[in-house]
Image: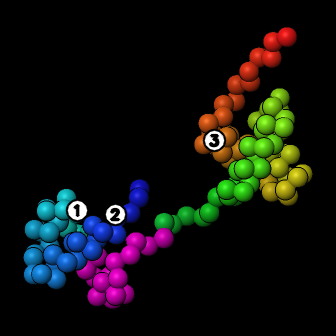
Amino acid sequence: MKPYAQDLRQRVMARLQAGDRVKVVAQRYNVDPRTVERWRERQREEGHVLPRAIPGRPRKLDAALEQHLAEQSDRHPDETLPQHPQRLAQERQVRVSRQTVGRALLRQGRTRKKDLVRQ
């Protein structure tokens, strides 16, 4: 889930500073009242209402590795899905699962099906 836009957060805080009640502001901007309260607490404690970092670990395949995977897939179009992680381990010393490679290929719009080469 993406965080709320910064301009919305600032408009909500401006209405609160103007004296509007939390419930009224929440209804006006279609935001949960508890969210408005959290933003007000964060403004008071931290001095801003910037979104926090999204939790979770970073992807093993960053943008550079996904680009390498795309090039690898173009260079070796007949390789199967289990062969791609093996080649990544050999070429880039990165160990990833077959599922991780599969998700990365799907994000690139590539399918597991191979085109038939007709001669």
Which residue is under mark 3? Answer: 108
Residue that appears at 48% across and 66% down: 54
Q: Residues within 10 Å of mark 2 (few under 14, many from 20)?
A: few
Amino acid type, residue under disc 2 in the picture: Tyr
Answer with the quarter of the image where residue 45 lies: bottom left
Quadrant of the image for the N terminus?
bottom left
Indicate which disc, 1 or 2, sits on the residue closer to the N terminus.
Answer: 2
Indicate which disc, 3 or 1, sits on the residue closer to the N terminus.
Answer: 1
Amino acid type, residue under disc 3 in the picture: Gln
Quadrant of the image for the C terminus?
top right
Q: Which residues are magenta?
A: 38-53
Q: Residue 29: where, in percent of width, then height? A: 19, 62
Are the residues at dot 2 and dot 3 in contact (C-beta closer than 8 Å)?
Answer: no
Q: Disc 3 on helix, strand or loop?
A: loop
Which residue is under mark 1? Answer: 31
Amino acid type, residue under disc 1 in the picture: Val
Q: Which mark is residue 4?
A: 2
Distance from Cα at disc 2 to Cα at disc 3: 27 Å
